[in-house]
């Protein structure tokens, strides 16, 4: 049974008929057709993929389903003076990377080595391995087979030569494991890395073996696999470290103490001592080999020159050694298993081929030359990295050059008199002096997002009430304000991901796949942007704003607003309900005013940089596995809330989502609050709504907020057709009044009924995930109200 599938019910199938272009057509026309399909599927422009320098017709064997290419920055490190068997002279290394400070560090190490007279390099061996496995019925048959195979090396070499002129079989070594025999075929492969070549050669050699009755008796062999995983292909293994796989290469140099001090900015003693600590740590943690940074150099050169990047695992194994000498420091590095080639794979691609040419790594014998260059630059990079760590430069270099600069986070002590004085001046209170700031304690319910995120990030986020001492025209007064410090959208997504991970199973798996489509992207800046709106239809129904403060470099998103006091129904979700018909009428009357601001302006709203991801039918259908996982989780973890009947009906909603969700996109939409419930609403003393916490606002039909308020604020006794009809009409008529549009009543009620399904599938599924890590007392009643409203809607209007 697949994750998320409900026992006893047919699994909803994905919609049929979606066009997926053929993957094996290598023409520019086919590429553009695939790209057009990809754009329609993702609903993104994907302009960066429109043009590519790659010739689709020359990519056979490199990629399938070709739609475009990505650019990776290439920097040039060096020069490095190399004295090798295959390299003589100064060489520059092209490094494809997005990690700041890496090229600079490699260049610094190369400078130190070159000033010291250069690096010596030697290729020690080259072998590529494949290891098929033969499973026999008994150990005795396996043992006989293993003993006989080495006697037929000549015949196996002949079989290999029929497949390739470049691969040469050196040996076949049997390994008996119970009733199975692993045969390790060892080859030399010339200037090719040889993984595909040796696979083909080994397959044909094994076919020869299978045709020999004197090697495999009748009924003895049960199965055969061309790679039994004892070769260590594309994996880091102690076997590869000891025996080598690919090219085994070494490099060494002697650095005088003066160069260590002038170029590497440390002393020989500090450098060696730093290395000893790093080496000891590697032993303690069970690392294969010991090095500081080999993977970075290997990955950067592999990417630049068209190597198989998946081989970085094994190719980065190395042993870096530093020794103190009277004249300075001796350094060496050995890379036992560089899986590289200068022909085949991606080496023929235009940029990659040119970068190989820039190092003289084309033509016969060039793979060995490339190996020596990689070894020399790996040594230079490790020298520079260990020096930086030993001298304290490592973090500062990344802060200056790297992409992961430390963030100087916003601190609460920055909420000082100057900060608030600026805020009051911005809000139309010029000349006000702030003479004091004091934190105060006010009972309140924090937003779900801020509350949960504050547990996972090491910074101050949430609501912070402050009392300001102010003076204006020499008159002293006090002003209460509320400061909201928001987490970043990345932190919110991470928080929700942690909650999903605690749920485990399909919820964790499918959440990761769709975490950027659940409304959290942009939640840090969206609320700030909305509070900067000037339309009085909006500003009259939200808290008074004094200032918004945004600093992306410091990940700072702050709102200073009025401190809401003397309100009716402030955060009544966990306490006595108290939302009377009068309160609901006020809220829905004013909700129509809020919705009128963007009603029918869908195109303009989509262009707003803060709107974030807008839900759509393809997304909702593609995310069906997530909705199923959430439904199953809520029923399994909270059976006292989610009945079997509710679960079955929810699965039916999910199974038909491709039929009912498109109807939303045919209706007029607007900016909805998208969290329109008693946690985020209050009624002012003058009888106006006050709606806050707008971070989840999105594009949807206005009935979405109507349905959410009814299922979260209605008293169960008031869930009857007359009451719901009356309240729905308050909202519809208000929207008509404020927009001047005629809104069809039947179509309005149809949209309302659909939003109840949408809330059940989407919003409440996520509520139950949050409920897993933090108990929400309101959730059970909200859920029961939702289904009571769905029952009522089906009884009175269908859908």
Image (cartoon, rainbow, N blue to C red):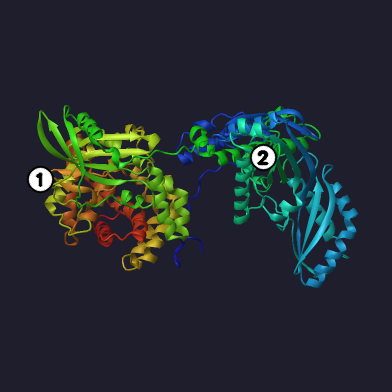
Question: Which mark sits nearer the N-terminus, 1 or 2?
Answer: 2
Write the residue at 66% across / 52% down: 288
- In this rendering, position of residue 738 left or right of residue 253: left
Residue beneath label 1, please?
685
Q: What element carries label 1?
A: loop
The image quadrant of residue 617 is top left
The image quadrant of residue 115 is top right
The image quadrant of residue 84 is top right
Instruction: Count neighbours of disc 1 (C-alpha within 10 A) and say few if under 14, some if 14 to 19, many if 20 or more.
Output: few
Image x and y of residue 149, in percent: 86, 61
Q: Is residue 689 visible?
A: yes
- Quick one: which residue is furthest to the front in this view? 326
Image x and y of residue 685, in percent: 10, 45
Q: Is residue 432 above or below residue 41?
A: above
Which numbered tag is attached to residue 730?
A: none
Between 189 and 450, the residue placed more toward the observer is: 450
Image x and y of residue 431, in percent: 16, 27
Between 565 and 410, the residue placed more toward the observer is: 410
Q: In this view, does 220 lie above or below 102?
A: below
Q: Is residue 63 visible?
A: no
Residue beneath label 2, please?
62
Dot 1 and dot 2 residues touching (CB under 8 Å):
no
- In this rendering, position of residue 160 left or right of residue 357: right
Between 469 and 748, the residue placed more toward the observer is: 469
Q: Is mark 2 on a helix, strand or loop?
A: loop
Write the residue at 71% across / 33% down: 348
- In this rendering, position of residue 214 left or right of residue 511: right
């Amino acid at each position: 049974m697949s994750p998320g599938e409900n026992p006893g019910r047919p699994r909803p199938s994905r919609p049929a008929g979606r066009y997926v272009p053929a993957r094996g057509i290598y023409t520019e026309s086919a590429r553009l057709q695939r790209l057009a399909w990809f754009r329609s599927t993702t609903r993104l422009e994907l302009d960066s993929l429109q043009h590519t320098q790659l010739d689709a017709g020359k990519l056979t064997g490199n990629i399938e389903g070709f739609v475009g290419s990505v650019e990776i920055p290439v920097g040039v490190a060096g020069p490095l003076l190399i004295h090798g068997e295959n390299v003589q002279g100064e060489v520059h290394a092209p490094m494809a990377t997005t990690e700041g400070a890496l090229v600079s560090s490699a260049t610094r190490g190369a400078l130190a080595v070159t000033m010291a007279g250069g690096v010596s390099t030697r290729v020690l061996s080259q072998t590529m391995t494949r290891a098929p496995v033969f499973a026999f019925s008994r150990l005795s048959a396996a043992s006989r087979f293993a003993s006989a195979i080495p006697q037929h090396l000549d015949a196996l070499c002949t079989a290999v030569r029929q497949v390739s002129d470049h691969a040469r079989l050196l040996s076949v070594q049997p390994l008996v494991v119970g009733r199975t025999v692993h045969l390790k075929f060892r080859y030399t492969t010339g200037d090719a890395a040889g993984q595909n070549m040796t696979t083909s050669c080994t397959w044909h050699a094994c076919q020869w073996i299978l045709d020999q009755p004197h090697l495999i008796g009748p009924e003895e062999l049960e199965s055969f696999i061309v790679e039994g995983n004892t070769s260590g292909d594309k994996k880091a293994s102690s076997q590869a470290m000891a025996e080598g796989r690919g090219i085994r290469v070494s490099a060494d140099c002697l650095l005088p103490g003066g160069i260590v001090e002038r170029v590497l900015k440390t002393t020989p003693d500090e450098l060696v001592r730093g290395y000893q600590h790093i080496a000891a740590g590697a032993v303690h943690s069970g690392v294969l080999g010991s090095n500081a940074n080999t993977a970075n150099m290997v990955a950067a050169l592999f990417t630049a020159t068209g190597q198989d990047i998946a081989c970085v695992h094994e190719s980065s194994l190395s042993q870096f050694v530093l020794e103190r000498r009277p004249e300075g420091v001796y350094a060496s590095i050995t890379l036992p298993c560089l899986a590289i080639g200068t022909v085949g794979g991606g080496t023929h691609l235009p940029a990659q081929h040119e970068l190989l040419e820039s190092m003289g790594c084309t033509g016969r014998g060039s793979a060995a030359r490339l190996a020596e260059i990689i070894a020399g630059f790996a040594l230079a990079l490790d020298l520079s990295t260990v020096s930086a760590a030993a001298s304290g430069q490592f973090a500062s270099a990344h802060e200056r050059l790297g992409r992961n600069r430390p963030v100087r986070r916003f601190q609460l002590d920055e909420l000082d008199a100057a900060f608030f004085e600026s805020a009051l001046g911005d809000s139309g209170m010029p000349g006000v002096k702030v003479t004091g700031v004091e934190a105060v304690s006010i009972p309140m319910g924090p937003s779900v997002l801020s509350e949960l995120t504050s547990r996972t990030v090491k910074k101050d986020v949430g609501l912070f009430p402050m009392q300001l001492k102010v003076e204006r025209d020499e008159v002293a007064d006090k002003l209460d304000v509320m400061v909201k410090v928001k987490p970043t959208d990345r932190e919110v997504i991470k928080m929700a991901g942690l909650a999903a991970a605690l749920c485990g199973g399909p919820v964790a798996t499918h959440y990761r796949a769709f975490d950027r489509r659940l409304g959290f992207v942009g939640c840090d800046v969206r609320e700030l942007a909305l509070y900067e709106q000037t339309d009085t239809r909006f500003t009259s129904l939200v808290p008074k704003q004094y200032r918004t403060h945004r600093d992306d470099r410091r990940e700072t998103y702050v709102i200073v607003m009025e401190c809401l006091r003397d309100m009716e129904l402030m955060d009544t979700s966990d306490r006595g309900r108290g939302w009377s018909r009068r309160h609901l009428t006020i809220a829905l009357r004013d909700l129509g005013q809020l919705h009128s601001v963007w009603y029918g302006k869908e195109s303009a709203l989509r262009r707003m940089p803060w709107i974030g991801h807008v839900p759509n039918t393809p997304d909702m259908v593609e995310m069906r596995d997530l909705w199923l996982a959430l439904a199953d989780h809520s029923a399994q973890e909270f059976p006292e809330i989610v009945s079997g009947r509710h679960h079955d009906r929810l699965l039916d909603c999910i199974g038909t989502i491709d039929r009912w969700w498109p109807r939303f996109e045919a209706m007029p939409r607007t900016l909805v609050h998208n969290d329109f419930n008693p946690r985020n609403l209050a009624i002012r003393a003058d009888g106006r709504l006050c709606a806050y916490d707008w971070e989840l606002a999105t594009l949807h039909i206005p009935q979405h907020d109507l349905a959410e308020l009814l299922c979260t604020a209605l008293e169960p006794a008031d869930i009857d057709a007359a009451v719901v009809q009356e309240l729905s009409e308050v909202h519809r008529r208000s929207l008509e009044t404020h927009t001047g549009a005629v809104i069809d009543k039947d179509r309005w009620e149809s949209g309302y009924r659909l939003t109840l399904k949408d809330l059940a599938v989407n919003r409440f599924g996520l509520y139950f995930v949050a409920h897993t890590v933090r108990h929400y007392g309101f959730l059970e009643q909200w859920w029961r109200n939702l289904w009571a409203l769905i029952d009522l809607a089906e009884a009175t209007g269908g859908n």
